[in-house]
Image (spheres, grey):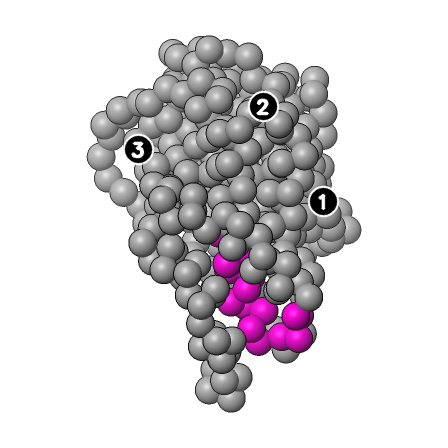
Amino acid sequence: MMVSVIIPIYNSQEYLARCFDSIINQTESDLEIILVDDGSADDSGKICDAYAETDKRFRVLHKVNGGVSSARNSGIDMMSGDYCCFVDSDDYISENYIAVLLNNLKSYCSDISVCGLSRTDTAGISNRVTVLNRREAQLSLFNEANGIRGYIGGKLFKTDIIKQKNIKFDEKQALAEDLLFLFDYLIYCQSENTVCVSDNKLYYYEDSSMGALTQRGQSEVFREKWCDAINACEKILEKIPNDKKRLRRAVKLEKTLQCVTMIRIMANYDEKAKRKSYKIFVRKNIIPYLFSKNFSIRKKIGAVAVLICPKKFFERKRANE
C-alpha cells in the first residue's frame, strides 16, 4: 500500500533538507517520494539529485518553470502509489504524519484523511477523529471557524480517484488552486465516511512573507491574478446544481470574504470598475455574511467597513511602507 509524496520545488534550497529529512524519517516507510524541480535557479535541483542518490525511494523530475500547479500535475502523472499526499518544499511533517493519515483512512473507510496544520512542531498525540460525509465535507471547505478548509497540506488522497477521474490542479489559477482541486476530488468521492479528520497538528508550514496570498497589494502595478480566489469561487458555483442551496450559499459567502479583501487592496489602484462590481456583490450578501458563524468578528467588521467607509480609509501611503 505505497504512498506517493509529491513535492513541488522552486528556489527553496534552504528548506529542502528539513523537508526531505522529515519524509525520510517517517514511521511509514513504504513511500515513493517525487521531487519536481520546477526550473529552480538556485541549488535546489542539485540537492534533489543528491538525495535521490542516497535513497532509492526518491524520484526526481527537472522541468521548465511552470508554477506550483504545473509541478504538482507533473508529480500526479509520475505517481504509482495507492495513496498520495502533497508537501510544499518549505514545509515539513511529523514523523508519524503519513502513518496516522493512512491508518485513519483505512480504519474509517474514507476517501480523504485529514490532520491539522501548525506553524511550529507540536507535541502529543490524541487522534480524536471526526467523520464527515460528502455533503458535510464540501461545506467544511468553506468554514473558516471549524472546517477542513481548502488547503492541500495535511491531507491524504486515494490515487485511483485522481487517476480515473483525471483530477488536476488548474494551472491558470495563481491562488486557490488547492480549493478547486479538493472540490473536484470530493465530487467523485463515494464513501459514506468521505472524510476523516484528526485533531492532531502533524503538518508544519513555513509562514513566508513571500507567499502568493501575502504578495497581494505589494506591487506598484495591479495584478489580475490577485483576483483568482474570487475566480475560484465562481468556477465552483458553476459546478453546483441550483437545488444545492446550502452549498451554493456557503460558496457565495466565501466569495464575499474574498471580495472584501480585494476591495481593500484595490483602494490603492485605479481599478474602479472591478472594485464597484465587488462592492455590489458584497452588498447583496452582507446580511447572511454577518449572521454566518463561519467568519470571525474582525472579518465581519471589515466587510461593513468597505461598504460604509470612504476610500481613503483603506489607502496606504506607499512612502511609509
Query: Camera-side residue: 214 or 296?
Result: 296
Q: Is residue 159 left or right of residue 131?
A: right
Tag shown at residue 162: none
Query: Camera-side residue: 296 or 46?
Result: 296
Q: Is the residue marked by circle 3 packed among few (<14), some (14-19), or many (20+) residues within 10 Å?
A: many
319 up-or-down from 141: above or below: below
Q: Is the residue marked by circle 2 packed among few (<14), some (14-19), or many (20+) residues within 10 Å?
A: few
What whole-number distance in Å separates the C-alpha atoms at marks 2 and 1?
30 Å
- Pointer 3: what residue? 200
Q: Residue at x 43, y 58 (%)?
A: 303
Q: Secondary structure at mark 1?
A: loop
Q: Residue at x 65, y 48 (%)?
A: 231
Magenta region: 257-272
Res 3 visible: no
- Pointer 1: what residue? 171
Q: Earlier in the sequence, mark 2 or mark 1?
A: 1
Q: Earlier in the sequence, mark 3 or mark 2?
A: 3
